[in-house]
Amino acid sequence: MKSVFPISELPLIKVTGRDYSYQVRRIFCVGRNYVEHALELGNAVERKQPFYFTKSPFSLLDADKEFNYPPMTKDLHHEIELVVAIAKPLQKATREDIEGSIFGYACGLDMTRRDLQNVAKKQGKPWDVSKDFDGSAIIGEITEAKEVSNVKNSKLKLFLNDRLQQMGKISDMIHSVDEILLDLSRYTHLGPGDLIMTGTPAGVSAVKKGDILIAQIDGLTDLKVKISES
C-alpha cells in the first residue's frame, strides 16, 4: 500500500573506522543518573530505580552538522552523556542475556531547553518540549564495543569554548549500564537500532549562538559541534 507522503528513512550514525553505519530506531534517556547533577538542579536523588524519557530518532543530529539554536527558549543547556547502542533483542533480560548485547558506545549531548523544563516540572507536566526537539540528540560516531577496553572506568569531559565545563566518570553513575539494560528491558522490547543516553554529570550550563562544544569520553571518538548563529 502506498503512503500519502514520502516515507522518511531512519537516521544513520557513522561507526568509527568502518564503512557501515548504525541505523537509529529509538532513543531512550536516563534521568538524574549522577548524584551531583541531580543536586545542582535541586532534584531528589533516586537510587531505587532508573527513570526514563525519550527523544524521537528524528531529533538526532550527527557530528557533521551545526546545531541550530532552537526557538521558544532563552536557557539552552548542554548535557554530555555516554550513549549505548544496542546490538541484539533484549526483553526481560537476565545478566546472561546482556552479554554481547551492546554494539558500541558514543559521546552524546542531550540538549535541553531548561527554562521550559523548569516550568513543566513546577506544573507537574511532561518534559517533552524541553527535551525532544530538532537536533536535541547530538551524537558522535559510534565506537564498537569490542574496540573499547573498559568504558566503565572512562572519564567524561565537556569543553565550552575551550573551557572545561563538565567532568565526571562513568563509574559515578547511580545506575550502571548493565543495571539500565536489565531494568529498561522489563518495560520494552529493546533491539538493534535502540540508543540509550545514560545521564550527565554535574556542570551543565547555558549556551549561546556561536559557542563551540567538544565532548570527550576516554576511548571514544570526540564530538564537536557549533551552535549556529543562523
Image: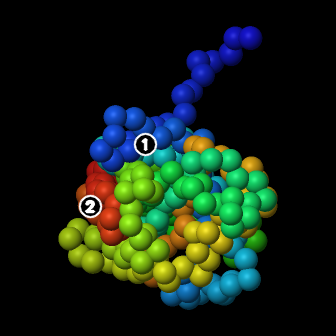
Q: How many marks?
A: 2
Residue 35 vs 106, above or below: the answer is below
- Identify which residue is drawn at 68% across, 16% down: 3
x, y percent for residue 202: 45, 82
- Identify which residue is drawn at 70% across, 11% down: 2
Q: Secondary structure at mark 1?
A: strand
x, y percent for residue 48: 74, 83
Name the residue carrying label 1: 13
Res. 74 visible in picture: no
- Identify which residue is drawn at 69% across, 67% down: 95
Foreground: disc 2 or disc 1? 1
**Residue 212's disc number:** 2
Q: Secondary structure at mark 2?
A: strand
User: How far is the residue under mark 2 from the one under mark 1?
Assistant: 21 Å
x, y percent for residue 93: 74, 60
**Residue 121's disc number:** none
Position of the N terminus, as image quadrant, is: top right
Q: Residue farthest to the front?
A: 96
Is 203 situated left or right of 212 in this image?
A: right
At label 1, the amino acid type is Ile
Is 132 situated left or right of 49 in this image?
A: left
Residue 149 vs residue 181, the one in the foreground: 149
Residue 200 vs 107, above or below: the answer is below
- Identify which residue is drawn at 52% across, 58% down: 84
The quarter holding residue 174 reads: bottom right
